[in-house]
Image (cartoon, grey):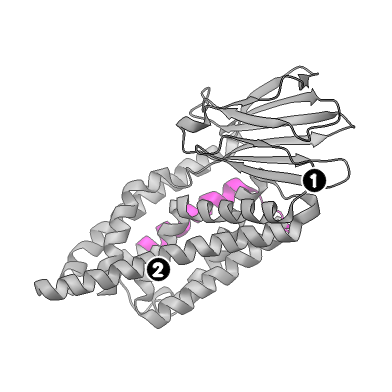
Amino acid sequence: MIRFLISMVLLISSNGIIQADEYRPAYLEFTQTNESTFDMLWKVPAKGKNKRLSLYVVLPSDVKTVSKVRSAFIGGAYIERSSVSRKGGLAEAKILIKGLERVSTDVLVRIQRLDGTSETARLNASSTSFVVKGAPQFWDVVNTYLMFGIEHILNGFDHLLFVACLIFIAGTWRRILVTITGFTIAHSITLTLAGLELVRLPIPPIEATIALSIVFLAREIALDRRDTLTWRYPIAVSSSFGLLHGFGFASALADIGLPQSEIPAALLAFNIGVEIGQVLFVACVLLIFWLTTQGLKVLTINSENWTKKIEKPIAYTVGSVTMFWTIERVSGFWIY
């Protein structure tokens, strides 16, 4: 019965997998160079080779641009660099993102000061501006990175589809718990190591391999050979590929960086956010499973027969789409 439900999840997810990991927040960073001057970095998701989201930074009138603005499209994003100056620094300055109210993308803001402290903020369509506080706030850092972790996993269709495949293969409640726990521990380890910069790996090959991991699981489901290592010990697969997925999570974290004064808090909050999002996804899948079970009992429908009919076509669909996605990511190696 549980595989009937997961078949439905895989079918729905396969329709959106090409859009996987499309949640890419814009990023605004100010790095202080002296008492009144800051290097400004503005990173906006690109839409094709020469188009970008229509998001623009609006600073107070007393903030002056003191260098030539340099811009370029690099690695799927529009990057803009400049230097700005304001007497006394940016404390109490209001920063507004024009156009943010019309899009679903978040903007993550970080202000890095000379004394090593930093300030972070998360802006969205309902909150398009914020006032710089001038002093690091521990709970602001925790809240920002916690919400970013939750949103990243819930918008990362590749990670969610991988988890859905794991649930399908695991089959029973006990095996699902063991398998997902193995995945969680594995990606938490590599996320932490990469976040602390103790281990560094090139991100494009990691992202391509993450896509390939879904192809691998789709192939296992299509072949339906229950005597393989994957079917007998799904935790071995979830743990192995979980290490790679952890580097994928870390790449998202690298886009915004970690506040130097609150690295442990930010890293832990992001990791907890990822786990919360993953638990929410699994809980929703299992809740739908329970509701579906009750409904099919009322209709006296044999779900196992339906599963046998649809699991292979769904597996081939997921495998084909994610194989295309793998090739697409490999072809992007030369862009970086």
Which residue is found at the position 58% from the left and 64% from the top? 187
Which residue is found at the position 69% from the left and 56% from the top? 139
Magenta segment, principal secondary structure? helix
**Residue 290 on image: x %, y %:** 28, 73
Could you tell me which secondary element the residue under label 1 belongs to?
loop
Q: Quarter holding the N terminus? A: bottom left
Q: CA distance from mark 2 to mark 1?
A: 38 Å
Hey, what amino acid is under mark 1? Ala
Q: Which residues are magenta?
A: 196-218
Residue 108 appearing in the image? yes
Q: Nearer the viewer, residue 199 or 85?
A: 85
The residue positioned farthest toward the left in the image shown: 300
Up/down of 68 relative to 57, above or below = above
Which residue is found at the position 66% from the left and 56% from the top? 142
- In the rendered image, residue 142 lying in the magenta stretch gets the answer no
Q: Nearer the viewer, residue 89 or 66?
A: 89
Q: Locate residue 8 relative to residue 91 in the image: left or right.
A: left
Q: Locate residue 63 relative to residue 173 in the image: left or right.
A: right
Q: Which residue is mark 1?
A: 135
Q: Which residue is mark 2?
A: 283
> Circle 2: is it few (<14), some (14-19), or many (20+) Cα within 10 Å?
few
Which numbered marker is on residue 240? none
- In the rendered image, residue 203 lying in the magenta stretch gets the answer yes
Could you tell me which secondary element the residue under label 2 belongs to?
helix
> Circle 1: is it few (<14), some (14-19), or many (20+) Cα within 10 Å?
few
Q: Locate residue 123 relative to residue 34 in the image: left or right.
A: left
Up/down of 298 relative to 47, above or below = below
Hey, what amino acid is under mark 2? Ala
Q: Quarter holding the C terminus? A: top right
